[in-house]
Amino acid sequence: MAVERGQFSSRLGFILAAASSAIGLGNLVAFPVLASKNGGAVFLIVYILFVALICYPVLLAEIAMGRKTRRNPVGAFIALAGEGSPWRWAGRLAILTPFMIAVFYTVVTVWIVIFMFRAFTGELEALATTDAFGEMIASPSIFPWFILLQVIVFGILLGGVKGGIERLAKVAMPILFAMLLMLIVFVLTLDDAILGVRYYLIPDFSRFNGGVLNAALNQAFFSLSLGMGIMITYGSYFSRQDKIVRSGSFVATADTSFAFLAGLLILPAIFAFNPSTNPDELSSSSIGLIFTYLPQIFLSMQDAVGYFGASMAAGSFFILVFFAAITSLVSIVEIPIAYMIDEHNFSRRKAVLIQAVLVTTFALLAALSFGMSPFLTDFIPYGGGPRSFFDLIADTFSEVILPLVGFMICIFCAYRWRDGFIDELSQGDESFRNSLLQRYLSFSLRTFVPLVLMFVFINSVAQKYFAVDLLMVFAG
């Protein structure tokens, strides 16, 4: 007997859920870091172009595959290509990838919960010390927080599509947007914040180079949750009466808008903290920025708003990041859960409990790789030095695999499922057929989009595992 699948209650429910999946740490932390290191406004312009020209076609392809088949990534490829087709391996990769991303995302979210709690309980000064973050991640005291986080995440997932995922998105997204706006207003009132606004919004095209292109495309792809199977799975919960093209546009716009607003928060805050900031000297690590540099920025605000005010601002920021992280984490873990329900006929409760055990086990191993276990800390050598178990998961599945899965989806929709793809996008939206956008999608998915994604995949492998940037090699 087949297990009944969930479905979003409305187009708004889909948009909010898909947007909440896309809007995560990549928007609120990684985007401002990359913008600061890659020319500010120049990076912003290139990023927006990549979202519109490269990522949007892939986003529509994933949603269309999911809605047509009403299946998870594995089931979608099998339904469209046939039971024995080798395309099923692309689907399996799109199941493994979100599972492994959920592992390192869980670890980072636990850190966020701890910093949020400590900021609100008057420990901002301690958090701003250079050793605070390193001491925390190497301490067994983080493990009780794992239990709390997993109860929250898998409790939401037990609620299903409408009662869990959609309900979370409808509550979290408005709160996220309101808190982000309030923090932006607060930061823009600080002295010298305008220096960050100028750097962020006024382009200096002399800073444009191959590194900007590579960073912008990697960030755009990860930020929109592409290549993870999320949009295929969420598309499978999408009503056939609603328009994919319009809904996909809303998702891409919301994701890009949140990334833009995050940059408008972080970069002015950095310059308000230190007007003589040289962006090139900032840490290139999102982790370093959020857990080391930003607490120092918030502490510096005590001269203007007092220690209590600075602590509340820091705590509010970490609440903001927590909401972004939890919505993305729920979306990521839903993919292997949907696979178990669709392909193995598990009940949602059984699938959720199995994933809870698996994700928690691997996440605990990843957490041990910051000094508590020497074996996991120096797990494997690559890229010029030893890397931890956490590094291996994060590097491989957040940057290397995503463009490869995206490439496979492009080729599949452009060649193997070409007519069906256009038919599905036209379902409930006949004006799309033979439109300029339809011709662009057909052309781009068959030509330059897969070529760009394949190059990004090859360059990511070269960068992560061999410490070679092919863009820099060609430019030099």
Image (cartoon, helix red, strand yellow):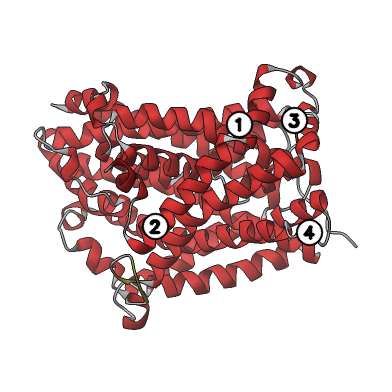
Image point (43%, 58%), residue name: 461
Q: In the picture shown, does residue 318 fall above or below 56?
A: below
Q: In the picture shown, does residue 52 fall above or below 9?
A: above
Alpha-carbon span between mark 1 and mark 2: 26 Å
Contact between labelled residues 1 and 4, with CB atoms less than 8 Å apart: no
Q: Which of 29 and 472 is in front in this view?
A: 472
Alpha-carbon span between mark 3 and mark 2: 36 Å
Q: Please state if 27 lies on the left or on the right of 32 as rendered.
A: right
- Residue that mark 4 sits on: 85
Mark 3 vs mark 2: which is more N-terminal? 3
Alpha-carbon span between mark 4 and mark 1: 25 Å
Image point (38%, 63%), residue name: 465
Give the amino acid type for the residue marked by disc 2 in the picture.
Answer: Ala
Residue 23 placement (x, y as % from top left): 48, 40
| Badge 2: residue crowd in 10 Å (few <14, some 14–19, many ≥20) | some
Q: Please state if 198 lies on the left or on the right of 181 as rendered.
A: left
For residue 425, which numbered disc appears in the image? 3
